Image (cartoon, coloured by chain):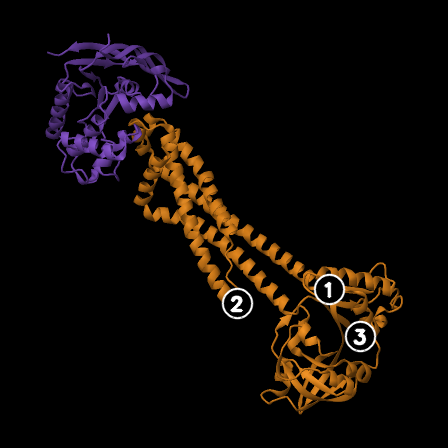
Amino acid sequence: MNDRVIRVEHLKKNYYLGKVTVEALRDISFQIDSSEFVSIMGPSGSGKSTLMHIIGCLDYPTEGKYYLAGQDVTRLDDNQLALFRNRKIGFVFQQFNLLPRATNLKNVELPLIYSGVKAHRRQELARQALEEVGLGNRILHRPSEISGGQRQRVAIARALVNHPSIILADEPTGNLDSKTGLDIMNMIKKLHERGNTIILVTHEAEIAKYARRIIHLKDGLIDRDEVVA
Amino acid sequence: MILQGLRIALESLWANKMRSFLSMLGIVIGVGAVIAIVSVGSGSTQSVTSRIADLGSNMITIYPRTPRGQFGRIGGSSSQEKFSLELAEYMEKFCPSISSVIPTKQVSGLFIYNDVNVSASIVGTNPSYMAVNNYKIEQGRFITEQDHEQRSQVIILGSELAADLFEKNNPVGQKVRVNYQGRIFMFQVVGVMEEKGGSMAGNLDNQAYIPLSIAMDRMTNSHYVSSYIVQAASSEKASNAVKELENFMVKFLDDENREQFRIMSQDEILDTMSSVTRTMSLMLGGIAAISLLVGGIGIMNIMLVSVSERTREIGIRKALGAKNKNILYQFLMESLSLSSAGGIAGIGFGWVVAYFLSRYGDWPLVISGISVILAFGFALFIGIFFGLYPAMKAARMNPVDALRYE
């Protein structure tokens, strides 16, 4: 049981839009083990973004339990959630979400800033992470000065730098052409082979297939939980 | 954590140089105005104070007061008649804190020299008048004891009067005629006074001085004087002297209610002056403080724009583990850096303005430390106060919404 990184029990999430209640997640339960590579797949409106926000500790569920690394996250306050995001989760977004005015190095340093690493050590770690994703020669460039694929690699370096328990990738290839997308997926695959736990949220079957296990979502419920060969 | 916020804040301010500068401007002008105005206030006060001190050392003047009349008639016995030369001698005898009493008799007449006519006032007085008034002779001499004894018809002219009458000619040794109430008196000019400028007692440069005996016996034929100029023995004794003189006058004139005389001391003039300038600087300082406040609102405005413009950045930072406090400090530090940089620039700006105003107005440049500290402190306070709301707004943002923001 100890290597269960994620345990979700009867998760529900409602949005209240005026008088209308939208049930984004109706009853979701699953577990993810350490070092697993799981895709969460579903068409838009299936609730996968909502699920990703909750798994990413960005939002609270309306009902149900969510254990991350053995800790009941639904009981945590804003500050403790921020700490969890910082220590346990590495985000890779579709829009890259880099700070446009900061250099790549500064962008990768960000999670370390909020975990209180000293400036000197921070630079060293960020530089290492950038070298790992093959951007050792783009350290002082800004996001606007590099290509989309390179930006996503900066974002991956940023996700890795704090050695999180899981890497949460939300449509990481959505804004890239297919060839660059392939590069990024191969990089994510390599991260998994090195022992990282990866959760990939996507609506593309081709991308989802990189994972060993695919959780299909439909209308706020788990439609299918299949293991890929 | 605060230091971290400061570093992030400075980086983002630097990235928006123009906007940072513009939002700082309100604070720069506000702080500058406070410092310049307070400096002008204290500089001009100092210059007025020293000018009043120039009028004469420890000078006290006693005037008769015209008693209130009823139904158009002059009421009571006229106190003016009690202002005699003997009174001056008694005063010296009974008031230990005074060093000398100078009686003066003031009349006005028409001066005639060749075809120039100038009307001016004539002060009959004795030789000590010059020293007590801190007045200096430019040319020739002042009244002497000999003039008194010999009743010489000599006259000393104020600088402006001399220039009006004689233009560029040398007045000393010339004779002028003075028409006083239809009678003509001949005077020989023996001296011209140095320029003194306007003062509380009127324009001294526009007066002429003659021996007291001439003014009293020959011109007016009266036994009372217009005023006594009293000099206190020292500046420490000046307030004692005023009390003694008051007691003396009350007893001597039998005037419990102090209706028949008025004592004016330099301290009193200074008090009035400084209360006027204090009120002025308070009022102007208040206006300057309002401009500081407006500057603060400008900062809040810019900060609110900056927060909503950077909603996505806030979302990213939160996703990467920034706590609400981190975000709060980041934006608070931004507004605080703006206002403190504005404050420092404002101190320099105020200094320069105060310097040029002091050159223009010819008073000493006085920058009081208190005004600098106060203006700067107020600027910091405004930075925190007006930065708090936008910073809290940023800190409380929901990370999911902030990340979705386009």
Q: Quadrant of the C terminus of chain B?
A: top left
Residue drawn at the location 22% of the way across and 17% of the way down: A42
Disc 2 versus disc 3: distance between alpha carbons? 38 Å
Residue drawn at the location 35% of the way across and 36% of the way down: B5
Q: Amino acid at mark 3?
A: Val
Q: Position of residue B34 (x, y in %)?
A: 50, 52
Q: Which callout, 2 or 1, points to the residue nearer the camera?
A: 1
Does residue B396 appear left or right of residue B74 in this picture? Answer: left
Q: Position of residue B157 (x, y in %)?
A: 66, 82
* Callout 2: SS: loop
Q: Colour of chain A?
A: purple
Q: Judging from the image, what is the letter of the chain drawn in orange?
A: B
Residue hosting label 2: B362
Q: Looking at the picture, do discs 1 and 3 lie on one chain?
A: yes
Residue hosting label 3: B225
Residue hosting label 1: B264
Q: Position of residue A81 (x, y in %)?
A: 34, 21
